[in-house]
Structure formats: structure tokens, C-alpha cells
Image: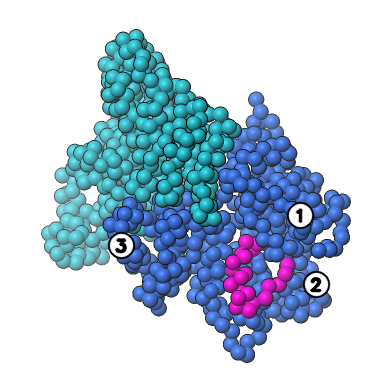
Amino acid sequence: MNLPFRPSPNGSELGCTDQQTLKQRGQHEVFCGLTSIVWLHRKIENAFFLVVGSRTCAHLIQSAAGVMIFAEPRFGTAIIDERDLAGLADIDDELDSVVGRLLERRPDIELLFLVGSCPSEVIKLDLKRAAQRLSKLHMPRVRVLNYSGSGIETTFTQGEDACLSALAAEAQPEAQNASEHLIVVGALADIVEDQFRRLFSEMGIQNVTFLPAKKANAPLIIGPKTKYLLAQPFLGDTARVLEDRGAKRITAPFPLGAEGTTAWLKAAAQSFGVSEEKFASVTAAGHRRALIAMDAHRDALQGKRIFFFPDSQLEVPLARFVSEELGMRLVEVGTPYLHRAHLSEDLARLPSGTLLSEGQDVERQLDRCRAEDPDLVVCGLGLANPLEAEGMTTKWSIELVFTPIQGYDQAGDLARLFSRPLDRRTRLGGLLCN
Amino acid sequence: MQLTVWTYEGPPHVGAMRIATAMKGLHYVLHAPQGDTYADLLFTMIERRNARPPVTYTTFQARDLGGDTAEIFKTSCFDAYERFMPEAMIVGASCTAELIQDDPGGLAKALALPIPVIPLELPSYQKKENWGAAETFYRIVRELARGDGDRAARNPKSCNILGPTALGFRHRDDVLEIKRLLRALGITVNVVAPLDARPSDIARLGEAAFNVVLYPEIAEPAARYLAKTLGQPMTTIVPIGVNATRDFIREVAELAGVNPDEVLNDRQSRLPWYSASVDSTYLTGKRVFIFGDATHALAAARIAKQELGFDVVGLGTFSREFARPMREAASALGLEALITDDYLDVEKAIIDAQPELILGTQMERHIAKRLGLPCAVISAPVHVQDFPARHSPQMGFEGANVIFDTWVHPLMMGLEEHLLSMFRNDHEFHDRAAPSHLGQAPRAAEPETVQAAPSEKAPVITGWAADAEKELNKIPFFVRGKARRNTERYAAERGVPLITIETLYDAKAHFSR
């Protein structure tokens, strides 16, 4: 595949599409897919996420979410106990009764997800059948769907992929006389969603839906007239469901920073026949604001060496952003799973020869990281403080998932997430030594 | 199957991690799927540990299940040995690995590593975190503690301190405090374990004359084993509070054969005087609700009653293993113990008990916030705030000082309460202005009146006459809820259909007896 030959900000060649990735098998220091419930339950207003799993599952989600701040969050765990495993209790009856009690206490719930876990997968608990059974029981008040967020099948953000696949699979077909419409796929913060909606509307693209919608029972229509634009890079299964129903993907890099956002919007604009002039007039102000906001951080980040541990699958688009738009140098870009097709546009904009690693052997990756001694390490919460104590500067990656980072008006915030740890270390000077 | 929206305790392998992380030179190989590594962040973020927990996870995936997960375990185990060179290893399974039955203990044994490898059986579908910690510590002690020493050669004035772990509620500071106390008594500390102990230290536990058990939830099984096999007696009093600390001093002095008088007479704690001073008069009979792990909840009940003069109106624990002593303690206070791990039950019990102060875990702190009640945290599960930068023990005399401040500061000071009632019509002290120390926005309504639950025995519906309602509003807002409740209860019990000014003052006279 021949790629356009462009000089990068660092003077090296661009293009990482054909790059071999480093694959190692060992300890994966990553969250499982259940963790994505933390943002999904805030995003989809009238949905409840019921994990069918163990005490570990319950402990994981509350630890990852720090959920004690919520009165009664819209997620919980049906904890399997030894009576269920020994067959002393009928596990279907037990689940039905848990769901019954839950729905009784939460009359506001209109959509219930039964979320599979490692234990439920290993004991082959059929949650699809359970969802159908419970749907029959509780419709029309509550629709019951299922997906798996188990660690043996999903990593962190893949939980969202599984959840959105379940929603997409339930979509209604298009009417015969349907016109072309756009679906933006991937959970975005409400503020970002509203910004994009305004931009599309100003361009004249009116028929836009977001998946997931804020209201769980908002209609979702998918068919051959559907064009979809991925807002998140971890949605391989959801894309497959959409394409099985005839939807076509608009190829684009992900909407991070000024250039990423412009390219993402432009791909949609071109696909919907928006004129160059119109596009330019709609996006110019946002693009300019993004550049101004990022400018404050460029000096701190330009030329700094950055190392990404695998976490959210956002690593490749983030690496594209920091290297192309902020002039950072990429030491290693680790990602749990590399979806080459969905990331093609971002990969093409990475400096050629960038070390990409997929999967993880955390011990050996730490060895590489220490040997390279980068200026900034992007890693999970389990590694951040230990690496700081070793003298490295870190950015914990989960904040890149929980913070609104997409779009023009978040470009400065995103740059700030990378510059702040460096700023902090400078301010503290030699405090930690001696 | 149990519906859980929040859990007080993690799974038992997290308890094992608390032991492994507390110790040095010990490594834990955990057969577990991808995702279980979340537990690392409990230690690196909540406790701000500057090193990763010494745990290797096999992180097997679905595609491995058809293949050889046992092989993955053996590779991980061997690699962990080579990389970390521990003095000893513990091996086990998390909930998912328990289901696939790979037998980590047998697999690790087959590797024939030149160090002790201790297999753990932690049934994830029955047991919880504290049990897992206790079982792990017991297994380690059983495997490593040597019993071949000369009992007669033991220094009678020496002991071990057992129980403190990683991620424990103030364990770090309690150990310092108890060491100081023991030093003052002339007793030497042979080994503290598991916190900061090496496997080689566990081996020499038998050199001490007796064991100090700080946290029975964690150390009791190991201490019982040591009592049985090595003939080491163990302490039974947890030194939280002034009276308990005094009893503890007497107990260890007896075990070590030393004179406790000097240490007992040394007025190190300010709690007794602070509690007796006139400003504390307003603490008298404050209604307090207590919930936490058994050790801290039991200690809190004793302090509340004997040392601060509170009324304990609710007492409970999530530690089912300690349901019996908890029931006994509650019954002595004329209460029924609340034994549950469902925080919604706890919330309901709190609302029913209508306390003026809640002593609980971080979860009860949030319940208190919602109900607009003052609260102090007395127990795990821990939060980043439970690892303060300053020395902040719960045990010993300094611990009692810390407890006095922690419990009393959320309440209104005596003089402050008096001034508030004097100036209650002042525009800055009006009813809707929240007490400044609660740090809240002005409340829209008084939670006390919202909670005024109708008495279940109410034979008739009682209402308030307008002038009685007006009179009620003259009562300072922080006692008004209590006055309203008492009056309504009085009226309901007597079948008074309409509460008048007369009823209000009749009730006041009735309840002030």
C-alpha cells in the first residue's frame, strides 16, 4: 500500500500502516470490559447494568468507579454463590427473582442489560436466553438485553463495543423511502455530542443520530441508507453489526485535536456532499480556537518522548494527536488490540517506524520503558504511582477515557492532560529527592 | 444469587493480596483472568504505595480455555520466581480460575522451586476479603513458623505483634503506637507481621513469649495456631479507647510479668479530661449509630458509652464471622445487632434509629451526607482519606485522642450550640443556614422533620394545631426534629388526634423524666 509521502513535524517520514507490531504474551495489566459500565450507565439515562458474576466483579466496578459518590448507581452485580454453582438453587429462578426485586425497587428503569462476566461465561450461563425470557416477563415496561463484559473476552473499552453491538442488533430497519442519514457511533460526553450535532447541523447534515443515545429507548434505525462515523476506535463488533444491516462506514481518523477533528468532520461532509466553502465556513472558528488552546501546551510538549502502555485502544489516535499536533516523539505505542482497518487513517499519520505493541507482557514492557526512560509515560492506575516513585512522569490513562477529549473545544483540555504532569514535576523541582 | 450494588469487602484473594503486599520477600502468583489486575490500584492509588503489589496474574483469556491454562500458570509462576527471586511464594486462584480447577498448588509444587511455595484455597463463592486475609496469614505462619526453638530460652518480656496488613484502617499508625506502649512497659517486639515482615521473620515468630493480636479479623486463626503448637499465649483485648488501652496494658503486663502501674498512671491521653470538661456536657446522651468491621465497631460502642457518654442507638457489622460477639455487645446495650453486608439495610436502620451522629465506614459517610447528619469514619473499607499524611492512630492513648477529635468535631461545639440558640432569630443564624462545619449549602428542608417517621403503633392520625406548630418552631432547629418526633410519639401512644401546645409541653415533661 502506497501512502502519501509527507514530512512529519519531527522531519521523519509518515506512515505506520504496514508496520510490524510487537506481540508478547504475559501478564496483561488492563481492566476487563465490565469497567466500561462506569461511563455507559451515566451516558444512557434510563438503563440499568446488572452484572451476573462474582464478588470480584462487584469489587472491580466499585473500585474503578469510586462509586460511593452516587446515591444508588444504575449498576449492580447479581453475585453467584456456591448454592448456584452446586445446583442447589436453580440459577435461572435466582436470576429472575434478583431482576424482579431490582425492577420493583427501580421503577425508573426502562432498559436492563444483563452483563456476562468471566464466571458466567465459564459456567456457560446462557444470558441471551435469560434476557429473552425476562424481556417477555417485563415488556413493555422494561426491555432486557445482554452482552458480555468478561475479562476472558473483552478488554476495558471493548465492553462498550459489546454493549453497542447489542443495541445495534435491536435496531429497526429503514423505511422504503428513507433518505441518507448519519449515525455517530461511540459514547461521547454530552457536551461533545451537542457540539458535533451543532456542527453537522450548520453544514446541513440534519439527520444525525448518536449511538448510544441519551435515552435508551430512543429509536435507532439502521439500513442501506445509513452511513456511520466512528467516534471511538474500539468498536469493531458494533461496526460489523451495522454493516450486516447495510450501513457504510465513513473512513476517517478519530476526532482528537484540531486536525483530527477537522479530518473527521470533513470525511462526513464529503460523504454528504457538503461544499468545501460551506465546510470551511462552519469549521474555521472551531479549528482556530483549538489551535489557540493547544498553543499554551506546545512548548511544554514539543520534542518530549512519550511511551504508551496499553489501556483503552485510544492509544493510536492519541499517539497521532501528540505526535502530529504537538510534536511529541513516540517511544512505544502499546494497545490492547490493534484494529488496523478502523485505525488506518491514524496509522498513516504516525511517524514511520514507530514501535507499535499489541497485547502485553507487563514485566517486559516495564523493562523496555525503564531502558528508554521517556519524558512521559501513559499508563494505568496500577502502574502510575510505582513509576512516579521510580522518577518517571506519568499520565494515568483512565482520565483520557473519562474526560471529554474529542472535538475542537476539548483539544486544549486534551493537550493539558499531557502537559500537566510535566508541569507538576517542574513545579515540585527536587522535592521528592533527599 | 445475591443482588449487590455495593460491597463492604472484596473477594478473598484481595485479602491474600493485602497479606502479600504487606510483607517483603513474598510473591503471590494468582491464576486469574485479564481484568483481575484492577486490584493493584487499590494499593497504588488508595494507599499511595510506591511499588506494585508483589502479585503476578496469569491473565488467561477465552482462547486459552480450550488450550492449556495450566501451562500458562506454570510459566507465569516460574517467570515470577526468576524475576523477583522471593524467599517464599503463595499461589492460588481467583473466582474464575477456581471454576476451571487447574490446581495452582499442585502445579507450583511440580515446578520444584527451591523456596517454600504455599498453596491457598480461598473459596471465592463463599468467603470474603477479611477471611481471605486471615486464612492466608494462617497458612503462611503454619508453613514457615519453626517450632523447634527452646521454649525455656524465650525472653518472657518479648512478644510479636500480629495483624497489621496493607490497605488496613490506620494499621500503619497503630503499630507505631502499640510499639511505643510496649517499649514503655519494657517489653521487646520480636516480629511485627504481616506488615513489613519477611518470610524469614515469620520463621522466628516462636522466639517470642506471647502474641499481641491487634486485628482479630486477620490474626486470630494464626495466633490460635501459635498458641496451640508453640505454646504462645495471645492477647484478647484490642486497645482502642482509653479503657480498652488500660485493660490491654494490664493484660500484656500480666503476660510479660511486668508492672503496669507507671504506664497506667502516665496521663498520656487527653480524652478523659476533654470528655469531663464542661464543653463536653452537650455530648451527653447524643444518639450514635455504629457500623463497621467487628473490631472497630465493638471498640466504638465501648468508647461511645463509657468514655463520651453517648447513647448507642444502633450497632452492627458486615463481619459475619464476628456476629456472636457483636450480638452480645448489642444485647448488653439493649439493642439488636445489625449483621449485614447490604448497605441499603444499614441505611434503613440508620433512618429508623434517628441518630445524631453516625460512626461508620466510607459508605455510612455517604449515607450521612444524604441524610444531613454528622459522621466520622471508624473502619475499613478504606478510602484515600483513610491514609492521612499525619500520624493518626486509632489504638493506644494517642489513638484515643485522635478518636475524640474525629468524633466530636463533626458535632456542634457546646458553646456554639448555646450561642446558636441565643441568636436563632438573627439573619445569619436562621433555621435554613446549615452549620458551617458541615460544609454544606443551605439546606432546603430540615432533614430531621423529613425523617419524622410515623410511629407504627399509631392508632389515629395525629396532626398539629397551628399554634402548636408555631410553638414548635420556636425550639432551636437542631433539637426541633427530636421534639417533633417525641411529641408525635407521645400523642400517638395516647391516641391524641390533634397536637396542641398542651400536648407539646406534656410530651416535653414526659420525655425529660
Q: Distance between the residues labelled 1 and 2?
A: 34 Å
The answer to if A410 sits in the magenta stretch is no
- Indicate which disc, 3 or 2, sits on the residue closer to the N terminus: 3
Q: Are marks 3 and 2 on the same chain?
A: yes
Q: Distance between the residues labelled 3 and 2?
A: 62 Å
Residue B264 sits above or below residue B400 on the image: above
Left or right of A33? Residue A415 is right
Closest to the observer, B349 or B110 = B110
- Indicate which disc, 3 or 1, sits on the residue closer to the N terminus: 1
In percent of width and height, residue B381 lies at: 41, 43
User: Disc 2 marks which residue?
Assistant: A280
Question: For the image shown, how many numbered marks are present on the structure?
Answer: 3
Q: Distance between the residues labelled 3 and 1?
A: 52 Å
Q: Which residue is drawn at 69% across and 37% down?
A: A370
Q: What residue type is labelled 3?
A: Asp
Q: Do the residues labelled 1 and 2 touch (CB within 8 Å)?
A: no
Label disc, if present, on residue B124 of the rendered structure: none
In percent of width and height, residue A139 lies at: 39, 77
Closest to the observer, B333 or A15 = A15
Q: Residue at x 29, y 41 (%)?
A: B321
For the magenta stretch, what is the residue range?
A232-252
Q: Colour of chain B?
A: cyan
User: Disc 1 marks which residue?
Assistant: A19
Closest to the observer, B420 or B264 = B264
Left or right of B366? Residue A286 is right
User: Disc 3 marks which residue?
Assistant: A90
Q: Mark 3 lies on which chain?
A: A
Q: Are marks 3 and 2 in contact (CB under 8 Å)?
A: no
Q: Residue at x 20, y 59 (%)?
A: B455
Of marks 3 and 2, the one in the foreground: 3
Q: Residue at x 38, y 32 (%)?
A: B139
Closest to the observer, B206 or B245 = B206
